Structure formats: C-alpha cells, structure tokens
Image (spheres, rainbow, N blue to C red):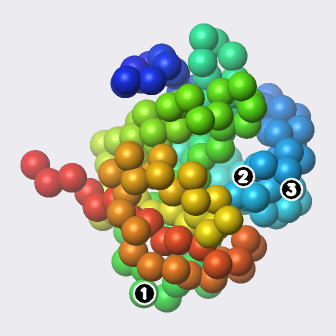
Amino acid sequence: MAVTDTGPSISLRPATAADRFMLRRWLSDPAVEMHWGNSASAEAEITLAMESPSAICRIVECDGKPIGYGHAVDASLWAQSLPPDLAAGCWDIDLVIVAPAYRARGIEQPALTAIAAEVFATTLAVACCTFVSVKAEPLVRHYERAGFRWTRIWTDPVVGPSWLLMKERPTR
C-alpha cells in the first residue's frame, strides 16, 4: 500500500519472519525503548502480534528502504495489561520510525492513518487506541494528526504514565 500525504511518499508491507533480525536490531535503539519499553518486552509484543491472526503487522518503507515498524492488535490480546474500561472491539496501534534520518519528517502521520484505515476496512473494530509515554510528547502530536484524540493518562505496566489516545471508527 503506497501512502502519500503532504509528507514523503511511503509504503507499508506485511512484516515477515525474515524481518526478525532487523526488528531485533531496531529494538535496541534508546529512542525506540522510550516508546516500546525494554527490547525484550518489545520483542515479545512483536512476536505475539506476528503470530496472531488478530493483528496487522507492517514494515514502513520509504523509497523501498525499511525505516520503521507498526502493528495493530486486537486489544483483547493484551488482556489484563490494559485499562479495564477499554471498549471491547478496540484495536491497539503502535508505530515507530526507527531510521533517525526519517524521524520528524511527516512519515508517522500517514503511516498511522494507513494502519488505522486498514484496521477499519478489514475488522469489526469499534475504535483504535494507543498508549504513548508522557516522556514522548512529540509522538502524541503524530497520533493527533492521524485523528486520535487524547482520553486520559493511564499507567502502562511497561513504560509507566502514558497518554491514552483513541480514534473511533469513522461513520459513513
């Protein structure tokens, strides 16, 4: 899927087992750890997503070069690590642009928009959500530009105090 917006042209492709070593290398980046937590827990989350039929896992590419990773997961897979009042049928979206030269270039918003659109087009999700560490405020702005709205602060068991952002299913 090619995505163009006011920013650079990007594409999303399915993440595969062949991407595991690249993902493992990316997860050791301190900037990635700020959003995803330590590399071991992040790798476990990605492994669970890649092995689940209730997940959409994507590699973000710019000019054919892999520069990031994102996934959308039926939030019920995370079970007790989520707020108990999170609506059934909500999908959790996480995205990271790993290549430093591509961060803050406008790639995050169209990638998030494309992943959310794929969730709504291929599932019965009622909403998409994400949890962004309060230490990563600039990332919140990318989610907001992609249509997510701040709901509240919630203490994530991996990264601590985080903003809970939601994007409701578009109405026709």
Say which residue label 1 marks: 85
Q: Nearer the viewer, residue 123 or 105?
A: 105
Q: CA distance from mark 3 to mark 1?
A: 28 Å
The mark lying in front, picked from 2 and 3, is: 3
- Please tell me which of labels 2 and 1 falls first in the chain: 2
- Residue 46, label in figure: 2
Residue 147 image position (x, y, % from top left): 33, 51
Q: In the image, is residue 161 above or below residue 44? A: below
Image-based side of 33 in relation to 62, left or right: right
- Does the CB distance between marks 2 and 3 fall below 8 Å? no
Q: CA distance from mark 2 to mark 1?
A: 24 Å
Q: Residue at x 45, y 39 (%)?
A: 109
Say which residue label 3 marks: 39
Query: Within 10 Å of the Cα at label 1, are there few (<14), some (14-19), or many (20+) other Cα atoms?
Result: few
Q: Residue furthest left?
A: 172
Kind of residue sitting beneath label 1: Asp
Q: Nearer the viewer, residue 135 or 155?
A: 135
Q: In the image, is residue 50 above or below residue 1? A: below
Instruction: Please say whether residue 151 is visible from this viewpoint.
Output: yes
Image-based side of 77 in relation to 121, left or right: right
Q: Nearer the viewer, residue 81 or 136?
A: 136
Q: In the image, is residue 163 above or below residue 63? A: below
